[in-house]
Image (cartoon, helix red, strand yellow):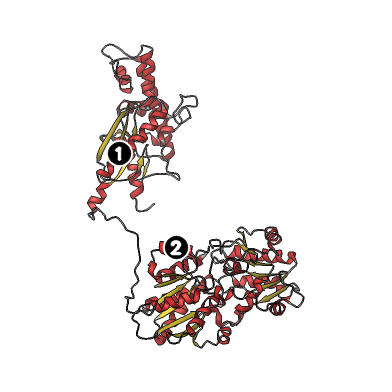
Amino acid sequence: MEKNGNNRKLRVCVATCNRADYSKLAPIMFGIKTEPEFFDLDVVVLGSHLIDDYGNTYRMIEQDDFDINTRLHTIVRGEDEAAMVESVGLALVKLPDVLNRLKPDIMIVHGDRFDALALATSAALMNIRILHIEGGEVSGTIDDSIRHAITKLAHYHVCCTRSAEQHLISMCEDHDRILLAGCPSYDKLLCAKNKDYMSIIRMWLGDDVKPKDYIVALQHPVTTDIKHSIKMFELTLDALISFNKRTLVLFPNIDAGSKEMVRVMRKKGIEHHPNFRAVKHVPFEQFIQLVAHAGCVIGNSSCGVREVGAFGTPVINLGTRQIGRETGENVLHVRDADTQDKILQALHLQFGKQYPCSKIYGDGNAVPRILKFLKSIDLQEPLQKKFCFPPVKDNISQDIDHILETLSALAVDLGGTNLRVAIVSMKGEIVKKYTQFNPKTYEERINLILQMCVEAAAEAVKLNCRILGVGIGGGIIHQHELIHGSSFCAAELGHLVVSLDGPDCSCGSHGCIEAYASGMALQKEAKKLHDEDLLLVEGMSVPKDEAVGALHLIQAAKLGNVKAQSILRTAGTALGLGVVNILHTVNPSLVILSGVLASHYIHTVKDVIRQQALSSVQDVDVVVSDLVDPALLGAASMVLDYTTRRVY
């Protein structure tokens, strides 16, 4: 790719915040510097680079012979959550002047640090194009959120793995602005191992240390669980002391919790322990030699799961900070590093092994690809980035009344004689109703209900009704809202137990109200009487092709059948006892009975309340619903109330 219509050199600003991101940005900076006919390079240094406690790492940038255009002191000390937020704010205050002065065409931002978020935010708001390095990756902490936030601000993306590329596409980023290049640090890593390393090992660990006989430890706080990460660091140090191998410990980064981790190191005397070397910073070229020839690398730094794989060095990844990263087979995860023994066992398993080298994160040719990508950027293209959202089906209508009318529920009424399913609109109108005779067996009944619901749902599509759910059951209304319960099965009133030795219920228990007073219960009793020739009285007949049901029992009772009257009285008493239990539990002001049996039960229910209820609840109003199809409307309201309620 060549320059697309740019009549001048591309002015590139590279902003680096810490030792880790510089290891990724430095190869790109060297590449830009070798092509002055295409690029002008401005270097901005901020963050922990400029803090003595973290090694004053800006000096390595100077040693690499880069001119630092601007140094910005942006870190508010404190190493806690508030200090991180304040540091972002301070950077946002200082960066506009720098960017106004430099006027870059593009800013290169790396990774997922809070400093990088400030850089990306400033550049985006000042209409400066952003190239983000290492977007689309997944780790396991707040870094994920920051990384993805920078992705949404960035105009161009350089990713390291195929999975990261797919993540960026899934995040609706423009595929034409994504480059799968590999990690720039691999351009150095893959040609580094054969260089002189013994002098480096001796310098940092002592003259008596041999390759593959020492450990490199690098552990950072987890900002979403600081307390646990400090405890995990303490256990790690205890395990390393017990393991008794020479260990190079790097100080943690500047995230919230790092101050407490340093206190743990000092409390355990790590800086003065004969087996430990504690350092604030190791130059990258020397660091890669140290990890390449280590017996093991332990901690939760991204370099452990990314860069170290290039050498096949064993890695123990502790906790959740890098849990989402792609790794080679050299990485052993200790996700719950909650005991010293668990970490110690991991050290015994990993130390001294040699694994195949991994190239998951790069093949050593990232920088040439990135430079080619930079040259292809056309500054004449509109600055406003576009998101590649998946197609969304157009709304049928934007009229609110129409939308509300088509929000619907499927209501199911399990009657003794018939099963009914209805499509009920938000306004309480029955759009369509389906009725079938109730089968004899439980399995047939369930299959028929499912079949009717499927048919109704298919018909709802044709009727432009959006089904929000399926409702079955009674309900309790408190302060004008239905009570749903913690698992959405509150007010299963039919299964209140009113007798310990009552008839079997379909729920598997016995003595429930439903076993006495439901349409199916009465149908069962009617059939029993009919089989014994005790149902029909003078003036009654049942056609041979008609199933005996609850209505026949009611008719017999009205015509003076004593046994039928007794069954209805028992059913009404069971219902009345259930209502008394409800009165004593929630003390409602109104009880509404609905369904075809309600008018036959109401007098018995009122009698039971007078005889059995406390005097304080006996004045409750008990009425029969005058709604058409109240069972269906009530079942639908269970769904419509919950799914459209604004506040839960």
Left-right relation of 561 to 88: left
Q: Is residue 572 or residue 152 the one in the foreground?
A: 152
* Residue that lies at the very extreme toward the right in this rendered image: 208
Q: Is residue 618 or residue 165 the one in the foreground?
A: 165
Residue 142 in view: yes
Left-right relation of 235 to 534: right
Q: Which mark is residue 167?
A: 2
Q: Which mark is residue 456?
A: 1
Choose the circle earlier in sequence order: 1 or 2: 2
Cα separation between marks 1 and 2: 39 Å
- In the rendering, at what x and y percent does residue 477 appear? 36, 42
Where 235 falls versus 643 (above or below)?
A: below
Task: Say which quarter of the image contains residue 246.
Answer: bottom right
Left-right relation of 358 to 612: right
Check disc 1: other Cα within 10 Å, few if <14, some if 14-19, many if 20+. Answer: some
Circle 1 or circle 2, nearest the eye:
2
Q: Find numbered disc 1 in the image and state the secondary structure of the residue it sits on.
A: helix
Which amino acid type is marked by label 1? Ala
Task: Say which quarter of the image contains residue 172.
Answer: bottom left
